[in-house]
Image (cartoon, grey):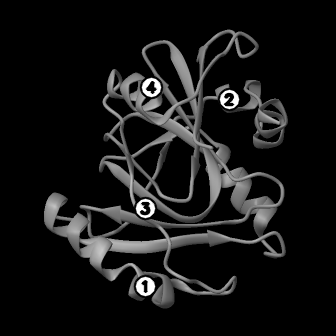
Amino acid sequence: MTSLVIYPDNQPSQGVRYIGFETIKNRLQHIGVALERWTAEMPLTADAGQDAVLAAYSDSVEKLKQRYGFQSVDVAALTPDHPDKAALRQKFLAEHIHEDFEVRFFVAGNGLFYLHADSQVFALLCEQGDLISVPAKVRHWFDMGENPDFKCIRLFTAPDGWVAEFTGSTIANTFPRYEDFMAELA
């Protein structure tokens, strides 16, 4: 279930949880983040690669390209047996920004976005069918967990695709990790 916790950015133990897609969507709109619910029901094998995922969702990708003028598309996908999962997790756990706005469409699994805006941290659990659009220059990081299991289509208006500018902040180290967030949902 898509879930949101909003924390003061200096009090990572004082979060308020929000449930209900419309409630979450409205909370995120205040910081310029768009959240949409799309259909993500195309059959994919666990080992489906980028070409298979993009072929399965070609209609959705084409709609997004037309809507926003995207020039590059890729698929971020990790499974619990990925040999570089720990290193990739650390890379995405570092707070960063993009000059381009970032759109992700989760077609399988889930992941935890942290958005740092207005002296708050918004921890958003995105799941299959969620499409998130993060404006340019919004500080954020992503936690896929110790045993990641997700596939998402990423779209960019810049031809270079995913290019991060790391802030150098250690704020991500002070907030609950994916495993703790999921344990609180249970």
Residue found at x 33% / y 21%: 30
Given contact means CB atoms under 8 Å apart, are the residues at marks 4 and 2 in contact? no
Q: Amino acid at mark 1?
A: Ala
Across and down, in percent, residue 104 comes to: 43, 57
Between discs 1 and 4, the one toward the N terminus: 4
Q: Secondary structure at mark 3?
A: loop
Q: Nearer the viewer, mark 3 or mark 2?
A: 3
Residue 173 versus residue 104 in the image, above or below: above
Q: Amino acid at mark 3?
A: Trp
Q: CA distance from mark 4 to mark 3?
A: 29 Å
Across and down, in percent, residue 118 comes to: 42, 14
Across and down, in percent, residue 21 comes to: 47, 36
Q: CA distance from mark 3 to mark 1?
A: 22 Å
Q: Which mark is residue 162?
A: 3
Which image quarter holds the C terminus?
A: top right
For mark 1, what is the residue? 56
Residue found at x 73% / y 26%: 175
Q: Nearer the viewer, mark 4 or mark 3?
A: 4
Q: Amino acid at mark 4?
A: Thr
For mark 2, what is the residue? 170
Q: Nearer the viewer, mark 1 or mark 4?
A: 4
